[in-house]
Amino acid sequence: MPQEPIGKILHFWPRVGAAQLELDESPVHVGDKIRIRGHGHDFIQPVESLEIDHQAKSEGWPGEHVAVEVVQPVHEGDEVFLIKDR
């Protein structure tokens, strides 16, 4: 399963189950699969929603901070990877 690093977690909001990602390397789109790896967890999930400045978007680009729903708690500094389907 090929993957590439796209950024890191900047913030986690536990009450809403969302995290802010800082995109460094590649864009991310609604429908993509991402892997989040950090201390004590490593999981893959689809990007089902994406927001920039509280506005729903279909994609985020390097240099942007995007918010996504996450399926389990994450931590600041966790690595985020884009899963590439062949």
Image (cartoon, rainbow, N blue to C red):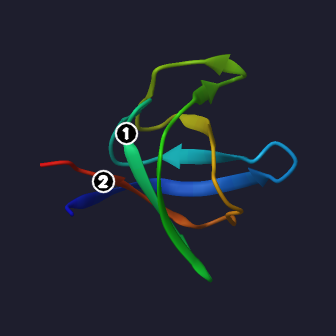
Question: How far from the left and from the top, in percent, is residue 23?
Answer: 47, 44
- In the rendering, which numbered label is found on residue 83? 2
**Viewer-proximal residue among 47 and 60:** 47
Question: How far from the left and from the top, in percent, is residue 76?
Answer: 68, 64
Task: Assess disc 1: are there few (<14), some (14-19) or many (≥20) residues with their C-alpha within 10 Å of its C-alpha.
Answer: some
Question: How far from the left and from the top, in percent, is residue 56?
Answer: 61, 18
The amino acid on which the numbered mark 1 sits, given as a three-letter code, is Asp
Mark 1 or 2, nearer chain start: 1
Which residue has dot 1 on it? 32
Check the image and name the residue furthest to the bottom.
40
**Viewer-proximal residue among 77 and 45:** 45
**Viewer-proximal residue among 82 and 43:** 43
| Quarter where residue 27 is shown | top left
| Label 2 SS | strand
From the viewer's perspective, is residue 25 above or below residue 68?
below
Please report the residue visible at 20 percent of the width from the left and 61 percent of the height from the top.
2
The amino acid on which the numbered mark 2 sits, given as a three-letter code, is Ile
Q: Would residue 48 appear left or right of 33 to someone viewing this image?
A: right
Check the image and name the residue furthest to the right.
15
Q: Are marks 1 and 2 in contact (CB under 8 Å)?
A: yes
Please report the residue visible at 47 percent of the width from the left and 37 percent of the height from the top.
63
